Image (cartoon, grey):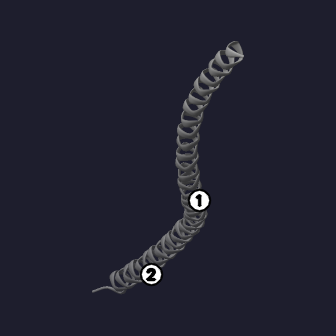
Amino acid sequence: MSVVVIVVIVVLIIVVAVAAVIAVRRRRERERIERVRLAERADAHRDEAETHAAKAGGLAERQEERRRDAARQAAEAERLAKQAKEAEARAETLAAEADSAEARVGRERDRARDHSHKADEIEEQL
């Protein structure tokens, strides 16, 4: 073989080796850039997750506060219902006493009328 052919083959081998090295470097750089991009995306998702977790915590606190308020309102409603029942019972008792007093007033008026008639009769006899 001639020296020229050997030189051409050696040059071609060197060119192919350089091209392979450049290709490997480019591929590694693309992979590095992809890893960086994926790491940034992962960080963005973590930040978003933290934001949502904080928001969920705030919502949970408000929900718990609303549950406590609802429990207080229910207790107050129960207390007021008990007071209403007691007031109703007192009103019924007072109404019964008023009915009884009204009946007594009627009886006393009848007795007063009877005594007044008897007094008139006695005066007429005098």
In the current view of this chain or complex, which residue is farthest to the left?
A: 1
Question: What residue appears at the point 46 percent right and 78 percent down from the top-left corner?
Answer: 28
Number of numbered tags placed on the structure image: 2
Question: What residue appears at the point 62 percent right and 21 percent down from the top-left corner?
Answer: 118
In the rendered structure, which amino acid carries the disc numbered 2? Val
Q: Along the line of sight, which residue is nearer the eye, 104 or 87?
A: 104
In the rendered structure, which amino acid carries the disc numbered 1? Arg
Where does residue 99 sit, x and y in percent of width and height? 54, 33
Secondary structure beneath dot 1 equals helix
Q: Along the line of sight, which residue is nearer the eye, 105 or 28?
A: 105
Dot 1 corresponds to which residue?
A: 72
Which quarter of the rendered picture does the C terminus lie within?
Answer: top right
Where does residue 10 sit, x and y in percent of width and height? 38, 85
From what the image shows, is residue 66 above or below residue 20? Answer: above
Q: Along the line of sight, which residue is nearer the eye, 45 or 93?
A: 93
Q: Is residue 10 left or right of residue 34?
A: left
Q: Are marks 1 and 2 in contact (CB under 8 Å)?
A: no
Q: Quadrant of residue 79?
A: bottom right
In the current view of this chain or complex, which residue is farthest to the top?
A: 124
Where does residue 58 sit, x and y in percent of width and height? 61, 63
Dot 2 corresponds to which residue?
A: 21
